[in-house]
Every structure is written in C-alpha cells, then in structure tokens.
Image (spheres, rainbow, N blue to C red):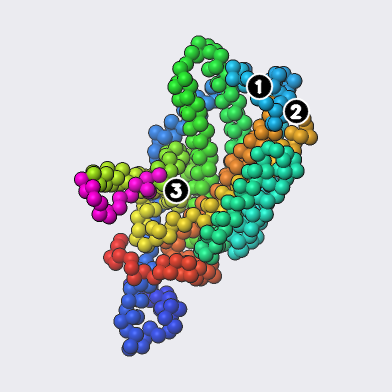
Amino acid sequence: YMGGELGGETDAFLAQTMGGAKGSVGGRPRSHMRQNSVNLYMKSYKGKKQPKGCKDVLYAVLFVVQLVIIMVVGLKFGPDALVPTSEELGPDEGLQDDDALTDNANETVVLAYWNIIKMSCMCGAFAIVLSAFALAFMMAMSRRLVYVALVLSIGVSFAWGTIGIGISPSSFVPITGIIALMLAVGYMFVVWDRIPFASANLTTALAGVRDNLGLVGIAFFFQFLALVFSIYYSFTFVGLHDAMFNNDDGMELSRNAKIAIYSLLVISYYWTYQVFMHIVNVTVAGTIGSWWFDEPSALWPTFTQATYYNFGSICYGGLLVGFVQLLRQITEGLRPNRDESALMCLYECCLFFQEKIVTFVDELADSFTPWAFTYIGLYHYGLKDAGHKANELFEKRGWTRLVTDDLIPNILAMVGLVIGGLSGSFAVILQALDGHGLTSIGHPVLMSFLIGFMIGIVLSSVLFGIISSSVFAVIVCFAGSPVEFQRKHPKLSDEMRHAWREVWPGSLDMENAPVGIV
C-alpha cells in the first residue's frame, strides 16, 4: 500500500485534512509531515491467513474430558437429588422468604425437577425473546444506541425496583433494582463524553451484522445449549453435594476436599460457558472480516474453523483469558512508582518484587487477551500467537490506550443485568401464580428470582456477544486495513474517522507513531 499505489488515495486524504493547501510553498514542511502521517495511516498491517490445522489440541482434549466427566457424574448422582413434584420436597417446602430458617444444616437438598425445568424453560424463553428484541432495537437505533441504552437502563432499573416493591416489598428484589438504578445513573455521567467514539464503532459493527443475519441464528443455537447445560449442571451440582454429605459410595471426604470439588465444578461450568461464548465471538470476527473487504460471507467457513480447527485455541482462551485479565486488573495497583522514599533500601526491595510481578502478568496478558479471539476468527492463529499479534498491531498504530475503552462491553453488561433482573422478576411472578415449590430449602421467592436472574444473565450475554465481538473485529480491521474500508464502505469510514478524531485527538494522525515499523 506504499509508494505509487497510494498516490491518488494520499492526495484525497491530504486535501481533506489540509483544506487543499498541500501544494503551497509556505506549507511545504507541514505538507511533508502530513505526507508521512498519511502514508503511515494508510499502510496496511493486515494479518496473514494461517493454513488449516488443529491448534492447541491439548486443551480441546482436556475440555472434552471434563465435559464427559460432568455428564457421567450428573447421570450417576443427579437422579438422587430429584423428586417429580413439590409435594415430596419435605417440611421446609412451604417456607416464605420472610420466615425464619429452620435448622436444615444437616439436611440434603432436594429439587422438584419438573417445576424447575418448567420455570427454567419459561424464563429462558422470556430472556431469549427479551434479548432478541433488544438486539433488534440496537440494530435499528445503532447511531443513537448508546445514548438510548443508558437512558433505557435507567428506566428499566426503575421499573425493576418498582415491580419488586409491588410484588414483595420486604424482599431483596426492589433493593437490587434500586442499586442497579444508582449504578446506571452514575455510569452515564462518567462516560458521556466518549459516546460518539463508541457509537461510530457500534454503527459499523451492526452494519456488518445486518448483512450477515445468520450470526443471530448461531447465537440462538448457543443460547439453547447454554440453557440446557445450566439446567443439567444444577442437577449435577446438587446431586454430588448430597452424595458427599451422605457419604454415598464411601465418599468420606475432608472439608478441604469438598471445597476443592465444588471449586472444580464451578470452573467446569465457567469454562463451558466461556467456550460457548467464544465460539460465537470467533465466528462473528471472521464474518465481519469478510464483510469488511466486501468478500463472500465467511460465516459458515469460520464457524467450521471455530468448532474444529480452532476449537483447541478457544478452549485454551476460555479457560485462562478471563483469569489473566482479572489478575492484570489486580496487579495494576502494584505497578512501580519510582518516587523518592526515605526508606531507600526497603523501597528498592519492594520495587524489585513489584517489577517482577507486573512484568510477569504483562507477559501473560500479551498473549491471553480478549483480542486474541478476534485474531483467531480473522486469521486462524493459535491463541498465544493471536494475542501477541493483536497487541503488536495496536502498538504499531499507537492505539494501546484507545483500545482499552470498554464503554460498549459495559453498556451490554448493564443491559444484560437489566434483562437478568426482569427475568428474575418474571420467575417470581410465575412462582406466585403457580404456588409450587422448587427446592427442599423453601424460600420460593428467593429461589425463583435467582433461577430467572442467572438464566437471563447467561442467555443475554451469549446473544450480546455478537455485538461486542463485531465491535472488536471492526477495530482490528480498522487498525489493519483502513484504506480497504474507505474503498469498500466510504460513508461508514468517514463517520468512524470523524468520531475517532473528536473523542481521541491524534488517534488517526500518526506523527507520534514510530516510523519504519513493518
């Protein structure tokens, strides 16, 4: 993209940014600097498609093995924790949420599986429909979506608290609604100035999704899988808990061993959920990449890559990326500060260990980054190579600070929390109308709300993964091939460049970027 190939495009960019003054004698040094800036901006850093081949196979095998173990454990222990109807739940079944708890510390937990399945399916259908309407609304209102989403989050949070007061004023439901309302209002004031940048990225991303609606069908499929697995996992967890408590099959375990097993069960659920999420994310990234270059849709080829060739990389990242990002957030406070200190010896000692810890975490974060899944979808790298290439791309463009803007993921998380709250309130209404118990520990309002809330959170996050991953793909493609975007989608390109310059001045003027990078 350098040299003679850029002549016409460079002139167009110079005319736009300098008002046609490029040829004046007095402006020659400025023009020369702008010429270098434009050449750097227009240089392509597009990645290279990798040959087909299974990558990170070990983690795919480990994932399948743990999934088989969960299935076997569920089939062995799950049925013992189930009863068909609420009449068989036991003496605590009729407890209301404001009743005193009975001493059930020595009792096993029993689930009325038909009631739970019925409520889970109805809450799942409600959450799917609600999140689908939210997605349709986002596509229709993409340019004003962030503004509208913030306002709607405030309104719906208010409705959540109001509904809770009407249904059960003495329970925690209205309290959670009020807390959500306070968080939504505070966050709106914090991020208001960054909204144009997020809106421009979102508009471009949703334009790509609108042209590839098959992505929504894939997300619906994984929403269904997530719902089924969540129900099965809850039966497995309770059944194994009861077996360990009752010492079934000689399972006389210490307290630490039980905690370890509970932790492994939680990790197993988290890992499986993340794999579902990232299969969708990788598929979206590859599909948006083909749309960016105006090529035939890569939806099904990318989906095949994600579920076969790159499945190991997705499993690898699904297990570790979230943990590494959390670790990085924790260690940010340890980043060394070389201010003078009276206790120089102690200070230097602490500084040494701080540097070692932060350097180690930064090295991990260089490979285990959420952007790795975008590079996997676009170019089919293995996980660690994908993460390193993504970070290298942003360093070359000088965008390392810019890409930390998390407004859109946070907005989606807020909307997901609201959908979870509404699903929980819907579950409470269902329980009040039905009047049947769910578990042997009683407290139907609490259990109903938790079931609905968790289902709403999990299912909406799977569908909204389409949006966040498409935005990630747009940013990576914009960093890698901005000129191709200008050629194929000029209107969207103009909108993005205008918004980026408004919110992040200098982000597209490359004078401060290193010259000579390849």
CB of mark 1 within 8 Å of CB of mark 3? no
**Amino acid at dot 2:** His
Where is mark 3, residue-wise? 370
Say which of 188 and 241 sits in front: 188
Q: Which amino acid type is shown beneath numbered disc 3?
A: Pro
Tag 2's secondary structure? loop
Q: Secondary structure at mark 3?
A: loop
Earlier in the chain: of badge 2 and badge 1, it is 1
User: Which disc, if any, is residue 102?
Assistant: 1
> Residue 198, position in %: x, y?
52, 61
- Which mark's residue is nearer the viewer, 2 or 1? 1
SS category of the residue bearing label 1: loop
Magenta residue span: 330-345
Dot 3 alpha-carbon crowd within 10 angstroms: few under 14, some 14 to 19, many 20 or more = many
Q: Which amino acid is tagged 1? A: Thr
- Which numbered dot is residue 436? 2
Residue drawn at x 45%, y 17% as measured from the top left: 254
Q: Quadrant of the N terminus?
A: bottom left
Return the disc, 1 or 3, that comes first in the chain's sequence: 1
In-front residue for pair 295/112: 112
- Furthest toward the bottom, the residue is 25
Q: Residue furthest left?
A: 345
Find out whether residue 202 is within the magenta segment: no
Left or right, 113 with respect to 284, comes to: right
